[in-house]
Image (cartoon, rainbow, N blue to C red):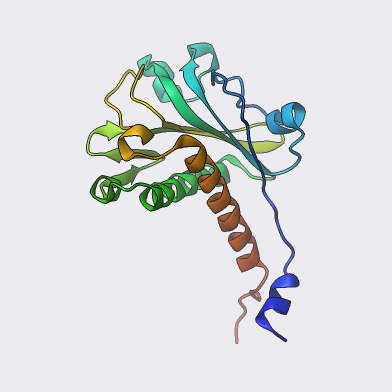
Amino acid sequence: MSKNTKSRLVPKAQVQTRFLEQQFKYDGTQLRSLFAYMNYGVLGDSIVSWVGPCDISFDHMIDGEDIRAQSAIRGGQMVHFITEMFGLNLSNGVAVQRLTTAIAIEVLRKLSPLHELAQSLRRDGDDIFAGDRKLSISIATVSPVSALIHFAVNVTNEGTPVKTLALQDLQIEPNSFAKSLMESFCSEMLSIHQATCKVRPATSY
């Protein structure tokens, strides 16, 4: 049996993707179950992305640490991602969130012509930094039916309440970054699923 034939026998756990051409503000209300399905017909596990400003009121803020500190979360222009994965608990969701951050760094290093700056990117939990400049924001939570993740990267440094880095600094076009990250994320999810389909249970021999 050929390698290609073997791969066709593995069930595919497809994550649906959609890049939304219309720009709109992320205000926290988009982080809800079935956002992609009810608004764009994207059914099942999904990751959707768009470009737009960010301004999250405390009423719609999820992170208790930010609420306690009264930390503003906003940006003049960002690339936003909403991921929804069904059947996951919060711990699983946080793991996927951090995997998304790691994948984003790989994509940024691949796309940026400024290799020294791109290589300086580092992950701290679910955030991306270069030195003390913050590139991304992210949060994971759960609904009654799914795990939900918002991940966003600055397109510009305008309107941010902290010292930031942006795609503009890395000379990366936001639409290309969004599509590349979603493609890499889906590929990783499929690879994870395939890895679970090729092992036999551990037993005492």
Q: Quadrant of the image for the N terminus?
A: bottom right
Rendered position, 38 above or below 103: above
- Count of marks, rendered view: 0
Rendered position, 182 above or below 75: below
Residue 5 in the image, given as x and y percentages of width and height: 73, 78
The reply to whether residue 91 is visible in this rendering is yes
Residue 128 in the image, given as x and y percentages of width and height: 35, 40
**Residue 41 as seen in the image, left or right of residue 148:** right
Rendered position, 76 above or below 155: above
What residue sits 41% from the left and 30% below the top? 155
What residue sits 63% from the left and 31% below the top? 20
Residue 70 in the image, given as x and y percentages of width and height: 38, 14
**Residue 197 quadrant:** bottom right
What residue sits 73% from the left and 26% below the top? 39
**Residue 13 quadrant:** bottom right
Q: Nearer the viewer, residue 128 or 113?
A: 113
Rendered position, 189 above or below 124: below
**Residue 162 as seen in the image, left or right of residue 101:** left
**Residue 151 as seen in the image, left or right of residue 44:** left
Residue 33 in the image, given as x and y percentages of width and height: 69, 30
Q: Nearer the viewer, residue 156 or 60?
A: 156
The reply to whether residue 84 is visible in this rendering is no
What residue sits 59% from the left and 61% below the top? 192
**Residue 37 quadrant:** top right
Q: Quadrant of the image for the C terminus?
A: bottom right
